[in-house]
Image (spheres, grey):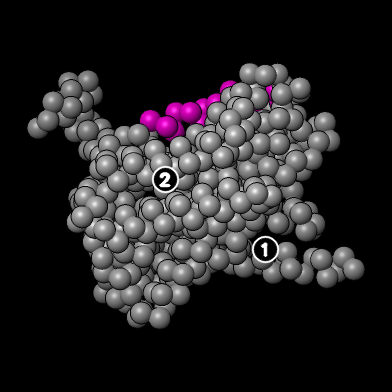
Amino acid sequence: MSRKGRFFQFIFGKKWGMRVFIFFSVLGPGMITAVVDNDASGVASYSVAGARFGYSLLWILFVSTFSLAVVQEMAARLGIITGKGLSDLIRENYGVKIAFFAMIVHVLTCWGTSVSEIAGIAVSMELLGVSRYLSIPIVGFLLWLFIVKGNYKTAERVFLSLTVFYFSYVISAYLVNPDWNDVIKSTFIPRFRFEFDYVYLAIAIIGTTITPWMQYYLQAAVVDKGIRVEQIRYEKWEVYIGAFVTDFFAFFIIVATGATLFMSGIQINSADEAALALKPLAGKYCFLLFALGFLNASLLGAIILPLASAYAVSEFFGWESGLNKKIEEAPHFYYIFTAILVLSMIVVLIPGFSLIKVMVFSQVINGILLPVILIIMLKLINNKKLMGNMRNNIAQNTVAWTTVVVLILLTALMFILPVFKY
């Protein structure tokens, strides 16, 4: 046993020490995938939601946490049991056409979100006084170098370390002194509004909480890390904790903007506007914390999103992939990562390009297209030949299918409401 394993046994006792050691050995894919979900476009969506409707969308975030936990656990279980990524499984079980369609859906939503991550770096650096035309080329090159020259273990440690910076949103929410009674009521008591903006942001919240790219990345990361079947229950808990942690941070983003911007009647369109608006209302420290949290979220997303595309496309074509392989061993994997990263940077550097609209809109598109990926995953996870006795139980199927139906209904409602308005 390793020195770390002996340490955990000494602290927790032999039985619990071994369990804690195994948990920390699998820690990574679920936590990183969930927390990175609070990326630039996610922070933007939560900020706009808090400013526009105060705390009244918190109940949707609370409910979607359960959906996130179930869907992420499904992705992890698929990867562990089959030892294959999602693109691989779709192609093998449903043919090239369906796999190609699913991959295109994934890559398009992934690229749109990747643009918003680079946009997030640009606006957060501009908030700190650095021009995007300087920050984007430098930061983009450093991110590329980090992935191409590193390996999975190093990348995972850095990703996990960066999640600590999300606590800046918790501190920001504490500094603005919200009405906690109202916050708690709004979290547990649904208050739905039949308004286009409300439905639009509801889809954005679900779309940024449970995204199509997450399923591809998590499943690939589980395979890349080499998590074994006997470790599956520990990975399950890692996924569940990750789901809670990501929405814990999202909760405080909505609370911070709801307690200040909504109460002051200030409408915003992005996270950077939220940070600027917080400055006179909550002080420079709140502004700085919010801006740094936004930069951290953008950096994580700018790495993970291109990686998610690289995994999916490589799996579809049967190319070598993974962060543990050098560029000469998996050239296509790194070419795709580089292409997504560079194309996203080019779009953001176009003069006059609106960095604001793409952030929330990309999450709405995620929410609209998510049912496509979820339906395919549900078919795979309930395939007896593929999964044996590790198929979904009734509760898991109920939560996942309810998520699909709710997203379809919300999308339909979003298109219907403007018609009735006139």
Q: Earlier in the sequence, mark 2 or mark 1?
A: 2
Name the residue carrying label 2: 303
Residue 324 falls left or right of residue 187: left
Residue 120 visible within the image: yes
Percent coordinates x, y for residue 6 in the rendering: 14, 25
Residue 113 numbered tag:
none
Residue 100 falls left or right of residue 15: right
What residue lies at 45% left-to-right and 52% top-to-bottom?
342
What residue lies at 79% left-to-right and 40% top-to-bottom?
267
Query: Marks 2 and 1, Cα distance to the nearest angstrom?
Result: 30 Å
Image quadrant in which you'd find residue 25: top left
Above or below: residue 207 compared with residue 25: below
| Viewer-nearest of discs 2 and 1 | 2
Above or below: residue 5 compared with residue 323: above
Q: Secondary structure at mark 2?
A: helix
Dot 2 crowding, Cα within 10 Å, few <14, some 14–19, many 20+: many
Percent coordinates x, y for residue 170 in the rendering: 57, 27
Image quadrant in which you'd find residue 119: top right
Residue 410 numbered tag:
1
Dot 1 crowding, Cα within 10 Å, few <14, some 14–19, many 20+: some
Residues 50 and 179: in front is: 50
- Secondary structure predominantly adopted by residues drawn in magenta: helix
Report the magenta residues as a range.
Answer: 161-178
Above or below: residue 384 compared with residue 272: below
Percent coordinates x, y for residue 321 in the rendering: 26, 58
Task: Look at label 2 and name its amino acid.
Answer: Ile
Residues 112 and 386: in front is: 112
Residues 65 and 360: in front is: 360
Residue 206 visible within the image: no
Residues 12 and 96: in front is: 96
Task: Look at label 1 and name its amino acid.
Answer: Leu
